Image: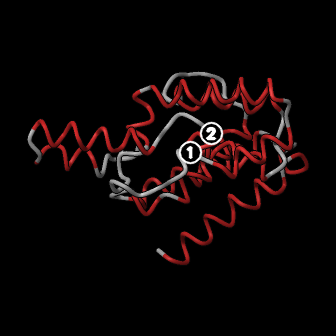
Amino acid sequence: MRKNRGYSNILQTLNKTTQLNYLKSLEIMITGSLKLDSPSLHSKLKRLFTNEEILTLEASYNEICKSPFILSENNWREVGVNFNPKPARILEILIECGANSYQLLQRCLRTIPNQEAKIETPPEICLALILDSVRHLSYVENPKPVYHQLKLESSLIVKDFPELLSSYPKLIEKVESAFRLYRKFS
């Protein structure tokens, strides 16, 4: 769905030593620690969960950061620019929208790197992923079909799971707002 921008194009023009240095610089920016990669999210987690639960979430986050998924998802970032890695962004979206159950966040961390697999994903996680994708459409080479696909997916999720309207109204509001803002400024 998303065309690789950034490191895949750059790597083709660089020699092997420079390629390795570039990839190392990306890895340095993602530490695998929520406390370092996303201090804001870590603070929110400390207010919501026990130390044991936070350690388990940290361990799951760290595993994702060791996987090839993290490079493929963040390959359009410029070297040296600080950013919130996708798994942390999705957790933060869920928490901000009231979906702050420990089990849901843990499931989210298991689901994110396996989006291509046919794993049954809770609808609130799907909407958080869509929201994140809409917010990052400016990094997609041909965003119009991606926009329409995301819009269709979000409509189907809300239609198939009407209980989301009462359970997570803030999440649905944020998704709709992101679509409006993208249309307005694209």
Which residue is pictured at 62% across the width and 53% down the height? Answer: 131
Mark 2 Cα shell of 10 Å, populated few (<14), some (14-19), many (≥20): many
Check disc 2 and give the amino acid type.
Answer: Leu
Residue corresponding to mark 1: 37
Left/right placement of residue 121 relative to residue 145 reads: right
Quadrant for the N terminus, please.
top left
How many numbered marks have been drawn onto this rendered protein structure? 2
Residue corresponding to mark 2: 34
Under tag 2, what secondary structure?
helix
The residue lying toward the viewer, choosing from 53 and 69, is: 53
Mark 1 Cα shell of 10 Å, populated few (<14), some (14-19), many (≥20): some
Left/right placement of residue 62 relative to residue 71 reads: right
Which residue is pictured at 69% across the width and 62% down the height? Answer: 176
- Asked if marks 1 and 2 touch (Cβ < 8 Å), the reply is yes
The CA distance from mark 1 to mark 2 is 5 Å
Left/right placement of residue 37 relative to residue 15 reads: right
- At which x and y percent is residue 123? 72, 37
- At which x and y percent is residue 113? 52, 29
- At which x and y percent is residue 77? 38, 53
